[in-house]
Amino acid sequence: MSRNKIHVKKDDQVYVLTGKDAGKTGKIIAAYPSKGRVIVEGVNIATRHVKPKSQHQQGGIIRQEMPIDASNVMLVCPKCKRPSKMGVKVVENGDKVRYCKACEATVSVISKGKKG
Ligand SMILES: [Zn+2]
């Protein structure tokens, strides 16, 4: 196993590849790297009908996003707005960055280089 790492993190914009919400994009609102799962805003919503527990409490439908497998999503490049494969490279100042393979834009800094 590869040290429980997933390729996306909280607040990333992602594109859903498979499942009932395939084709949707949304923001990751929670990531569980140890489980390899993420929760994406508006994706894989489970609805639950709730009966009122008392006269003062309303019943209704609870809508809640359920986790999906991180391998089912693809990061959307903030620059070219396309679901893109990400690469890792070391840039001039020594920073290790994640970059978009489509437009080569730096998406995020993974670790700071010596000069940074
Ligand atoms: Zn891009």
Image: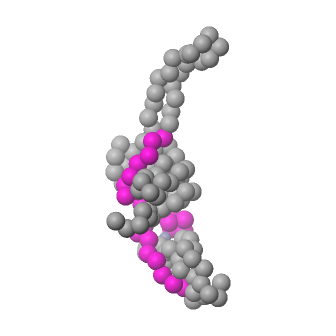
Specify the segment rendered in magenta.
65-91
Given residues 82 and 35, the one toward you in this image is 35
The structure residue drawn at horizontal position 59% and vertical position 84%, both measured from the top left corner, is: 113
Given residues 10 and 3, the one toward you in this image is 3
Question: 16 above or below 56?
Answer: below
Question: 80 above or below 73?
Answer: below
- Residue 62: percent from the left, percent from the top? 52, 29
Residue 89 colored magenta? yes
Q: Is residue 42 visible?
A: yes
- Residue 71: percent from the left, percent from the top? 37, 58
Question: 48 above or below 23?
Answer: above
Answer with left or right where residue 114 lies relative to residue 20.
Answer: right
Quadrant of the image containing the N terminus: bottom left
- Residue 114: percent from the left, percent from the top? 62, 87
Quadrant of the image containing the C terminus: bottom right
The structure residue drawn at horizontal position 44% and vertical position 71%, both measured from the top left corner, is: 86
Residue 86 colored magenta? yes
Which residue reaches farthest top?
A: 55
Colouring used for the render: one colour
